[in-house]
Amino acid sequence: MSAELSVVVPVYNEQESVPELYRRLTAALSGVVKSFEVVLVDDGSSDSTWEIIRELAARDGRVKGLSFSRNFGHQMAFTAGLDHAGGDAVVIMDADLQDPPELLPELVARWRDGYDVVYAVRARRHGETAFKLFTAAAFYRVLRRITRVDIPVDTGDFRLMSRKAVEAFCRMPERHRFTRGMVAWLGFRQVGVPYARAARHAGETKYPLRKMLRLASDGITSFSYVPLQLASWVGLAVSGLALLALVVAVAVRASGGTMPAWAFAAAALVLLGGVQLVAVGLVGEYLGRVLDEVQRRPLYLVRDSVGLGSADQRPPAVTI
Ligand code: UDP
Ligand code: MG
């Protein structure tokens, strides 16, 4: 029989955090749900994270583990966890205890109220750099303006999803995965719960600027065409300016004045060159993603698993 609640956690080199996460999760959930399982997805860790997961799974049958053949990224780890979770509701959360397990009873309570998606909104954030706070706040607000999907601001991936929402999510085959946007896209009844985001329990962030930018750009390109359209708008504005400059040049000549012809020509050339390069770059961003999609590679590969039976493949999409 499957558990009432599954908790899916991506782990990448988190050997210091996993035992504490297990302790706090089991404490927070005891008495709250009839039964639960914890699905730990090891995203190609190079420390002893996988050994720790195996030990926990050997001691406690509620702990299950998947280990990727290499580092596929946080978002793929969520996907694999959701593919393999059997609970009537599934929580996804980070391993570093920035998402407090003690919030789970509240998420479960809202699910029991009839919501399909209960997402945790960061009311306060501790232990983050000013740079991260500023860029995150700006990103969520820009994203909200340029997408048609209603993606809640200041919300990470920490959330609970009902079985219905999970099955719908598992039918989304794309490989550039921006989970928080994809779940918003699903619809159903959704509600936010505010919480204070803690500082990391141990170690340092596994999200260097490079990965953060990738995620941000996946979020924008998967949910908005605005950057593509930007090229035409800027092109239009530049053409308007060029036309104006032409009129000015003709007027200056007609009134007997002189001005060097190259001044206009040079300015127009540089401006147009810049605009065109930006536009080509934007098209490239989208084109690259189209290429990735048509290759239809598996989203992730499993090297090893505990407690999950045969967990090699992404199970066939469920029809609802
Ligand atoms: N993570 C992962 N694969 C990666 C990077 C991170 O599975 O390539 C996990 C990591 O172990 C953690 C979660 O994703 O559980 C969030 O990462 P992190 O806390 O480093 O990000 P931050 O909170 O600094 O944005
Ligand atoms: Mg973190």
Image (cartoon, rainbow, N blue to C red):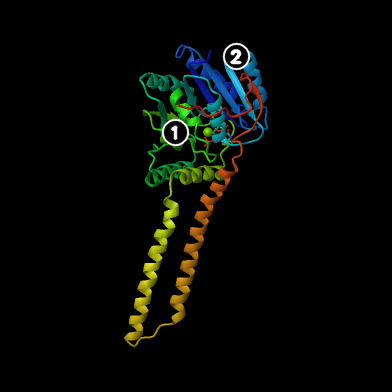
Q: Which residue: 56% across, 49% down?
A: 288
Q: Position of residue 124 (x, y in %)?
A: 41, 33
Q: Looking at the rendered structure, which numbered label has been put on residue 56? A: none
Q: Position of residue 59 (x, y in %)?
A: 63, 13
Most extreme residue toward the front is 319
Question: Amino acid under label 2?
Answer: Gly
- Seen in the picture, residue 49 relative to 219 is either above or below; the reply is above
Q: Nearer the viewer, mark 1 or mark 2?
A: 1
For residue 240, what is the image quadrant?
bottom left
Q: Secondary structure at mark 2?
A: loop
The answer, for residue 291, to whether it is visible in the render is: yes
Look at the numbered disc 2 and say if its residue's Cβ is closer than 8 Å to ligand 1: no
Which of marks 2 and 1 precedes in the sequence? Answer: 2
Question: Amino acid under label 1?
Answer: Val
Q: Looking at the image, which is closer to me, 234 or 93?
A: 234
Query: Which residue matches tag 2?
Result: 61
Q: Residues within 10 Å of mark 1 (few under 14, many from 20)?
A: many
Cα separation, mark 1 vs mark 2, equals 29 Å
Q: Mark 1 near mark 2, Cβ–Cβ under 8 Å?
A: no
For residue 83, what is the image quadrant?
top right
Query: Which residue matches tag 1?
Result: 183
Q: Position of residue 165 (x, y in %)?
A: 44, 27
For residue 153, what is the image quadrant?
top left
Q: Position of residue 248 (x, y in %)?
A: 34, 77
Q: Which quadrant is the C terminus positioned in?
A: top left
The answer, for residue 162, to whether it is visible in the render is: no
- Seen in the picture, residue 229 relative to 215 is either above or below; the reply is below
Q: Looking at the image, which is closer to me, 221 or 152?
A: 221
Q: Which residue: 40% across, 83% down?
A: 259
